[in-house]
Image (spheres, rainbow, N blue to C red):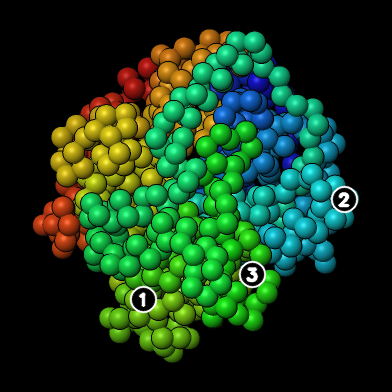
Amino acid sequence: MAWHKQVLRVNLSKGTCKAEPLNMKWVQDYLGQRGLATKYLVEEIDPKVDPLSPDNKMIFVTGPLTGTMASTGGRYSVVTKGPLTGAVACSNSGGYFGAELKMAGWDMIIFEGKSPKPVYLLIQNEKAELLPAENFIWGKSTWDTEELLKKKHQDPLIRVSSIGRAGENKVLFAAIVNDLHRAAGRSGVGAVMGSKNLKAVAVRGTKGVTVANPKEFMKATIAAKKVLADSAVTGQGLPKFGTQVLMNVINEIGASPTRNHRDVQFEGASKISAEAMHEKRPTDGKANLVTNQACFGCTIACGRISKIDETHWTVKNKPEYWGASGGLEYEAAWALGNDNGVDDLEALTYANFICNEDGMDPITFGATVAAAMELYEMGVITEKDTGIKAPFGSAEALCKFTEWTAHGEGFGKILGLGSKRMCEKYGHPELSMTVKGQEFPAYDSRGIQGMGLAYATSNRGACHLRGYTVASEVMGIPVKTDPLTTDGKAGLVKAFQDATAVVDSTGLCVFTTFAWTLNDIQPQLQTACEGDWSLEKLNLVGERIWNMEREFNNAAGFTAKDDTLPKRLLTEAAKTGPAKGKVNELGKMLPEYYKLRGWTPDGVPTKETRQRLGL
């Protein structure tokens, strides 16, 4: 129950699609989605494989609660070895695609090899076939791809997950986009898809999903939905303002990385905030924000739908961008805005539209532009290199860079490498604000100490969604801790990392944890799934997943030396705000973290830890 117990294995080299049984022994140890697919990946590929070679594999995977009545039960993940980092990559997405895949009768799709020519996968319940994409959707944006596939197969209810031109061009931070503006966004999973000549997956499913104990499952989901509705965050803040509710909050506490982390507060934050998105424009009397939107089964509805100002210089002669589409979320608004010193809300909306349209991670893209702008201001690169004047604050440069990177043109080819490779190319690796090659999201670890440790130890490179201590350090969820101290942060980070590994494996959205704990999730799993899913077991599963990912990275060549932060965050103190005069004190937290994890001082899981977790 909850699982269909079916895996679709697609060999792109041979052009075959074959069903095989899901490994239910692994299900009991790794649950589903992130945990289960990562287990398949580490068993089937060499950790040292070139991420863009045919020998790498890519897995689309659902969780046991995907497609059920559980609130937010529409998630799916893409698991592979990431080209941006060379580490394990698991990119999570919402929308409706994941539920459709599950309702078609599949828990997981494993893609292997490389197609000789561009193809797409069409799934209609148990029927799966590879069809030609060349001279049809190859070379098209994700928006056009979805429209063309629905038209060809004469079914408006088909759900599509695809890459844009960025994925085809193997931009190292290319995303996989479904439902027009939901994305498996980070670590370059779209580049892996492009390297396999796989343009899209189109799914129509009508089988539904069954649960073990429907009556008790209904009770558990109804109770859990009430918790979400009663929460100030999931019941009020996120529906009204979306994740952008954080823009002014994080800026005020002095933890908003600005101009490539040179500063911790952005003077233009209020102009690109959630509140600004609600304000009516003087040009047309309309607001940037049109409405909120929910993913499959979601009772939070934090998604944004925005409509750009048709008179704005970015789109004045581009009517194709005048329709409403996915609006700015906090991480994108920060990366495109604060990190580049750009406070033009419409320009950011335009850049974000292009990231959706052609499948790029706006976090890595925006942070890479920020590094380029710093290189430009230092005189290391010039207009001859960039093709345009590119100082901090230039909305025009930001928008041109977005277009060029999406299309693989000019300086966009350099930006498409990500900031680590770009900064190394120009002789200034210290200007890349990354961990393990992945760019930071929107929280400065000088002002939120726990996030420094979370970034440094994240298995997929710098990431807020692997251990969101901001919830505790800023919002007081589940308990309030002081963001400016290191005390207790090692235990806090470990707890968040393990719990998040569980949530990512269920098919639920991690945003539910602003209100839920595992105590709210466990009854839903227990009544939906066969077997024992006690709280004790779930905690062990989360820890097992984290250590499995760590061991894969270690085998891929990562060491404790990679559990660090850029020199800027460790030596250059915050200039303003509550954290003024502070650097991140990673050195105080990391040894304690290793000890709590049951790892050696070199960051390797001990024999005892491996035995305890059954690795």
Left/right placement of residue 11 relative to residue 85 reads right
Q: Is residue 14 above or below residue 356?
A: above
Task: Where is residue 472? Give x, y as percent.
Answer: 29, 35
> Helix, strand, or loop for circle 1?
loop
Crowdedness of circle 1 by 10 Å Cα count: few (<14), some, many (20+)?
Answer: many
Query: Pointers 1 and 3 in contact (CB under 8 A)?
Result: no
Image quadrant occupied by the C terminus? top left
Residue 135 visible somewhere in the drawing: yes
Kindly identify the amino acid type of the residue bearing the numbered disc 1. Answer: Gly
> Helix, strand, or loop for circle 2?
loop
Tell which of 486 and 609 is nearer to you: 486
Crowdedness of circle 3 by 10 Å Cα count: few (<14), some, many (20+)?
Answer: some
| Disc number lying in front (1 or 3) | 3
- Give the residue displayed 71% in from the left and 24% down from the top: 209
Q: Is residue 52 above or below residue 415?
A: above
Residue 594 visible somewhere in the drawing: no
Q: Earlier in the sequence, mark 3 or mark 2?
A: 2
- Give the residue displayed 57% in from the left and 29% down from the top: 71
Q: Earlier in the sequence, mark 1 or mark 3?
A: 3
Residue that label 3 marks: 321
Q: Is residue 317 above or below residue 179?
A: below
Mark 3 and mark 2: Cα distance apart in space = 26 Å
In the drawing, what numbered circle is on residue 153?
A: 2
Residue that label 1 marks: 393
